[in-house]
Image (tube, rainbow, N blue to C red):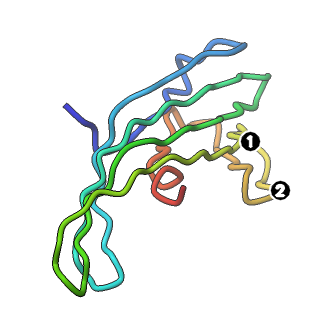
Amino acid sequence: MALTQILVDLNRLEPGRSSQSGDLDLVVRDAAGRDEPHHLKVRCALDVQGRRVHVDGHVGGEARSQCHRCLTEFARAIDTRFELILQRGGESPGDDVVALPESVLEFDLTPHVREA
């Protein structure tokens, strides 16, 4: 069964490297306003370094679309990556660094998967 979000449990992360993976079903609206289902496989390498977690994500899968002219359905392959750093405390110095309050126990990677 596919998930609707990919969560990193910040409380369970041990120092050093680990990985997390899962299937994710997203529905994305195309330029014509039609919903396109995306079945994705998400793999993340996590590297915990003190108060920072480096996330190196890979997104692969398939998107089902429909030609707007002839209405023929077709599949598009998806193969992309994303990176970000989760930092406990402080402020976000850039787009790829997300500052998190100390009280946050989990982080949702789904918006970063969607953007990738």
The spot of residue 57 in percent (x, y) is 58, 37
* Circle on res. 7: none
Q: Secondary structure at mark 1?
A: loop
Density class for disc 2 (Cα within 10 Å; few <14, some 14-19, many ≥20) is few
Residue 83 quadrant: top right
Left or right, 26 with respect to 107, comes to: left
Q: Judge depth for marks 1 and 2 and give the one in front.
A: 2
Identify whether 107 is placed above or below 9.
below
The spot of residue 22 in percent (x, y) is 37, 29
Left or right, 111 with respect to 4, comes to: right
Tag 1: amino acid = Gly
Toward the viewer: 104 or 37? 37
Identify whether 103 is placed above or below 98.
above
The spot of residue 114 in percent (x, y) is 45, 57
Marks 1 & 2, CB-CB < 8 Å contact: no
Residue 3 quadrant: top left
Residue drawn at point x = 77 percent, y = 55 percent:
92
Q: Which residue has dot 2 on it?
A: 93
Tag 2: amino acid = Pro
Q: Which residue has dot 1 on it?
A: 89
Residue drawn at point x = 44 percent, y = 41 percent:
60
The spot of residue 67 in percent (x, y) is 25, 77
Residue drawn at point x = 24 percent, y = 36 percent:
2
Q: Secondary structure at mark 2?
A: loop
Quadrant for the N terminus, please.
top left
Density class for disc 1 (Cα within 10 Å; few <14, some 14-19, many ≥20) is some
